[in-house]
Image: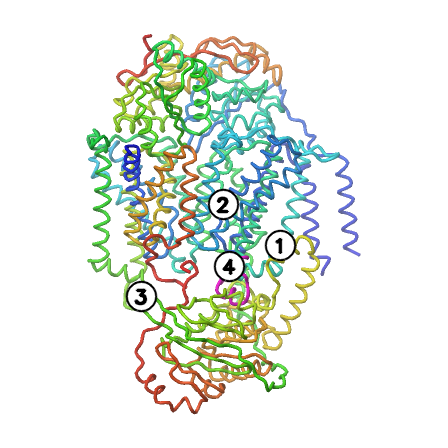
Amino acid sequence: MLRRRATIVLLTALALTACSAPGSDKKAAGDDSGPIKIALVDAQSGQLSSLGAWELKGAKLAVDEWNAQGGINGRQIQLDVFDDQGDPTVGTNLARKIDSEGYIGMIGTAESAVTIAMAPTLKQAEIPNICSGQSPGLVAVGSEFLFLNGPTSTTYDETLAKYIVDGQGIKNIAMITNNGSYGKGEHDAFLKALKARNVTPLADQVVTTDQKDFSAALTGIRQKNPKVIFLGAEEVESGLIVKQARDLGITATFAGAAPQGTPVFLDTAGAKNAEGTIVSSPYLSNDISEASKKFAAAYLAKYNEAAELHGAKAYDGAQIMLTALKSSNVATGKELADAIRATKYQGLLGGFAYDKTGVGIFATSIGTIKDGKLVAASS
Amino acid sequence: MRQLRFAPLALIAVAAWLLPYGLDSYAIHVVNVILIFAVLAIGLGLCMGVGGQVNLAQVAFFGIGAYATAILTTRSGYGFWISAVLALAATVAIGLVIGTPALRVQSHYLGIVTLGLALAFTNWVTNAEITGGAEGISAIPVPTLPGVDLSSEYLYYYLELIVFTVVLVFGLFVVRTGLGRRMRAMRDDALAAGALGAEVPVLRMTAFLLASIYGGVGGVLYAGLIRYVAPESFSIANMFLLLGMVIIGGRQSLIGCVVGAIGLSLVREAFVDHPTVAQIGYGAVVVLVVVFAPTGLAGLPGRIRSWWSRRRGQPGTAARLQPFQPYPALAERADAEEVLRVTALSKQFRGLKALDDLSLTVTEGEIRGIVGPNGSGKTTLFNVISGLYRPTRGRVEFRGRDVTNQAPYRLARAGMSRTFQNLRLFGDLTVEENLLVALDRSATVDSWRYVLRPISVLRRNRDLHRQAREVLDRYGLTEFAGLPPKSLPYGIQRRVEIARAVAAGPSLLLLDEPAAGLNGEEVRQLSEIVRSVRDSGITVIIIEHNMGLVMSLCERITVLAGGRVIAEGGPAEVATHPAVIEAYLGDSMDDIPPVAEEASR
Amino acid sequence: MQVFLQTIVGGVSLGAVYALVALGFSLVYRTMGLVNFAHGNVVTVGAYLASTFYLSSKLPFALAMVIAIGVTGAIGLVIERVLRPLENRDFDLMLIGTIGFGIVLDALIIMIWGATGRAVPSPVPSAPIDVFGLRIRTYDLVVLAIAAVATVLLVLFLSRTKRGAAMQAVAMDHEAATAVGIHVGRSNAIAFMIGAGLAALAGGLVGPLLYVSPALGGALGIKGFAAAILGGFGSIPGAIVGGIAIGILDSFAAGHFQGYSELVTFLVFTVIIMIRPTGVFGERTVNRA
């Protein structure tokens, strides 16, 4: 008898609850008082956490500047950090979290795969996101809430190919790229740029992201005797490849995008080995303009270390987000996204003007490594 | 009483049903992810905790399920549910392939092989065009269900909850009935399980089969929930996290695995801004658990209970051994057939000749004694007869059939049963379950019944329990039914092992030193049992050092020395044989090697 | 042909490091039947310690290595002490316990040294030697030489010293060893210490070759373990042969299958283990049934 009664109670409860679907809670997004909440999502732990650390420093610098000047419309800006651990699953969790906790904008991530994973949720929640990836895959997502704080691989590699093939007239080019999301993007973009110039690479070697010995790939390349070797891998792996290539007696010049201009790359490869490397980057050095000098000085004062590309990109991204917030009178959702799209901003990387795809800048500069420093190329 | 037993369950059910009403959209997402991990943890628990197969590829099964769903929906354009079924099938197929090394290697070898294959999987998805490379596959369509919008995480929760409940109940159903029992027996002692007819190779594959089904289900749910797959989600770090859940929760208990999955996920969620601290925390907990509480959280109540009762000075139990009730004797048959014929058997261990051209015949209804000095090859002979060793030369015929080189479980199923010199009871099973393993002669390949005819499985299980109670009664073990064998006095453990061997319903029973370590009264009871067993129609071969027992019990005695038969005949005849006397006085050979470990077989 | 030979050279130099890692695995396993899954993380710790002393404290490379080996050996002792209750009891639980230790060490490394890595300059002049078009790095030769010396020393220690003989006895039968008065716990502790020291040696040596980061040991650990099993788990010469074999297999897989190299390496490894579970030199420990 007792059991039957329990069943009835249970069923009634179910019937009652079934009528109203759960989850009709309204989030307190359009809140007009208190600080403006912006989320920074990046890997703060795991293999990619160095990128995350740089991004945080850059973005925080921008936010602090605004807060020091009184914030926006008298409201302070609150930048909260979330760790995605470089894992897309964690990223999707965080996308929901920043939605439910009422963040109106997001900065990051540096890992394209994580950003792509988060994009649908952010789109649904109408939270504009300025990310630091450069993969063409980010554009392919087609979300009007997703923006890049730099050029895509296509731009990087188009500029690079233009410089090498058109400018220097070099056609003996070999490629070595890894199979990670960055390396794959670089591989495809550079190959496309070469194809457009009717150049076929002498060798097209793919390595894994955690490979340690490249003698097989590099010996293969050595036999083809290229003049330039294109590197599509992150800082450390690129450094190892260059080091081992020099040990194998390869004298060709290396070329690559942003990672090949960083100190980590230089340290890993050894400055002597990396000499002459051609780099396509939107931010060649800290003293490229007045703005970058000012940024680098502030960065050095705050963190006691030299600023670099990723910090600069995140700084630009945060500035754009904040400028749009100001111009739109702290709008949220679609309105804020439109405001970002309408923002014309002269940043450290150059002039930003967003198009429909969420890309705001389409130019990089060519630099070379001279005496262990990245300097603008004299073409 | 019965109603009350279901009250907490009903309460949990209502709480689970109402849970989403108290959660915001982020929390419900976290809960949805936790449920997926719980499903994976159950699968890992079934494979590792229940089946004893170290499986570090569970995360790969998870990935295969998710990726297959993603590929089939986005690339091939199938509907979500068709894709889900196909994905599950793909996971199971690959799971069985990944499981095949378990047939050859165990323990840490299996660990590194499965780990390597899991790495191979992530390597493949990072490279292949079809899996979208490192960027993964996005825009997996929302699963459709008429009338329910599954793009809402709240409604998706109910889908997951139902699936979770079904797979949990199914898991518990497996663990608590014949299949799970046999897997646990194999985990505790694969040799003894094989000697009782458990098809060890099939069971190992079944363990991987179950793991891959759960992995596939988890993967499908993941694909439907996150709607995006990328290689990083199926990394080794996540595998170790999953392992941590199962170990902390208690790998041998499915409920424990679920508790571990929920607990560890919540703790990680609490420390989401300090992942490094969380990592140190859960790593340390894993270490502490394996050292101090190997049974995990699930084992804690039991440990506290036993600690409490020990503190209160209660003697373990008041259970007492009851006398053995003899089997009804069968009328003696005049035309006794040959049960066992061993011809020119030799077994060589590297340099050592353990058996040397040995021949032996045993006829139906006999109690045959095998004696000999240490190292004369007695146990080796048993091991060859029961299929644990492959003979170097010679043949073994059992009831007229050549059974040389047959797997132990085949011999067991053909009617051969044995005990071991140094007891091999299943330590983590109760006494009753030890007997149930022996009584259950259903084939593991018939496990499809679990899915298609669960009622018949339950009915059969009830039947077995009734039989087990009869055996317990007969051997006077009823009061020990629910206890783990390790907690029992040695003499009782011996009796359990014999009861178990006889429960398997053999026509030939091999007893390896059954009287070792028994006191005078226990030896007397033993000889009574052995005689009754023989009278019930079972032929018995007994290896024994206790000469008094052998002389009084056996009609014929075979004496071994140096791996050869040196004398055979009635007790009086053998005792005065000159070769026997010489062998016993001039005994100086080393002990023969013990039963080899599985991994080296 | 040149690609073939150069690939072998590359494989051997990394293989020497795998061999050192495998040596540590095997030594611990043969002595106490424990598979130390934290071994790879201990390699990382060793690499960080060595590079810290070498770069920050400006000590000579050799001295930095010695200190790193010492400190890491102490960590080995701690791990052994904590897991001692499980010794000779449950294979799988110990295995999982060491995985737990690995997780903790991994997090500690990130806490102490941060998640970014560091490059370590080569302590010897890096100009490679040119042999008929084959380029051999001087540092690789140093690594090979140290690996060889370490192996010889280890074999001498096990066969010529009293302590080593005691450890051999424990490896063969720990109960009998206890019976003749050998302190099994101490033997195990020493095995663990030497194992961790070997890990530090491998880590320290690999630093200038690669890049020291928290992820360094993970891959080395798994490959090193595979090497130990391939050579015959518990066998000292097996560890060396297995290490070099995995190194070469790795290099060739990378050359021929490019991105898919890891897949190929582990598939080949699995097939070999299925065909011959005892590895090249067979399992040297006694059965523990």
Q: What amino acid type should be assigned to the residue bearing mark 1?
A: Leu
- Nearer to us of marks 1 and 4 is 4
Closer to us: mark 3 or mark 1?
1
Residue A350: percent from left, percent from top: 44, 10
Give the residue pinned by disc 1. B172
**Above or below A183: residue B324:** below
User: How far apart are labels 2 and 3 at the CA level?
Assistant: 38 Å
- Mark 3 sits on what residue? C178
Report whether mark 2 lies on the same chain as mark 1.
yes
Q: Amino acid at mark 4?
A: Arg
Amino acid type indicated by mark 3:
Thr
The percent coordinates of residue B344 (x first, y second) are 41, 75
Q: Secondary structure at mark 2?
A: loop
Residue stretch in magenta = B186-202
Residue for point 30% across, 43% down: C244
Using the numbered discs, state the Cα–Cα distance from disc 4 to disc 3 in whole angstroms.
29 Å
Residue C277, image x and y in percent? 40, 54
Residue at horizontal 27%, vertical 66%? C181
Which is closer to the viewer, label 2 or label 3?
2
Tell me the tag on residue B57. Answer: 2
State the image coordinates of residue A343 (x, y, percent, origin top left). Answer: 54, 10
Disc sitting over residue A293 in the figure: none
The answer to whether dots 1 and 4 both sit on one chain is yes
